[in-house]
Amino acid sequence: MKEIILGEIAGYLRGELLGDPEVKIYGICGLEEAREGYISFVASPRFLPQAEKILFDPERERPWGFIKTSNVPRPASTEKGRGSK
């Protein structure tokens, strides 16, 4: 994956960025594997406590960011009642 900055991703998603917009992102990983330079996403509010624990861990001194969005369209094949055969 080519390097991209968090601010660009927030722009693509039309989301609200909290944190450093210059954080460099090199790839994607799950919350359990969260590490510097990688991005994860939370699709359900039940995972927010886990995400917050990772983001605000006082042991981790690094730039961080969080993009809050609720307007990301789902592909037609995953929308309820659409795309299923």
Image (cartoon, helix red, strand yellow):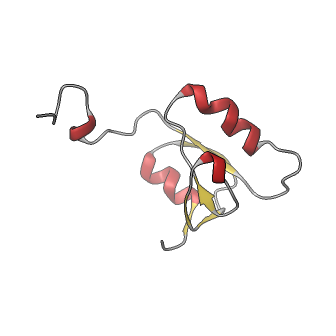
71 is higher (above) or lower (below) than 64: above
Total labels drawn:
0
Q: Where the C terminus falls, by quadrant?
A: top left
Q: Residue furthest left?
A: 85
17, 41: nearer the viewer = 41
Residue drawn at x 60%, y 32% as measured from the top left: 47
| Relative to 66, 9 lies left or right | left
Question: Could you tell whether 56 is left or right of 75 in the image?
Answer: right
Q: In percent of the image, x 45 and y 32: which residue is there? A: 70
Residue 52 vertical placement versus 22 (above, below): above
Residue 84 in percent (x, y) is at 16, 34
Query: At which x and y percent is residue 7?
Result: 57, 57
Left or right of 15 on screen, residue 56: right
In the image, residue 78 lies at what x, y percent? 27, 36
Residue situated furthest right in the rendering: 59
Which image quadrant for residue 29? bottom right
Task: Report x, y in % for residue 53.
Answer: 76, 38
Q: Residue furthest bottom?
A: 2
Of the pair 17 and 34, the residue shown nearer to us: 34
The residue located at (56%, 26%) in the rendering is 45
Which residue is rendered at x = 76% and y = 57% of the image? 63
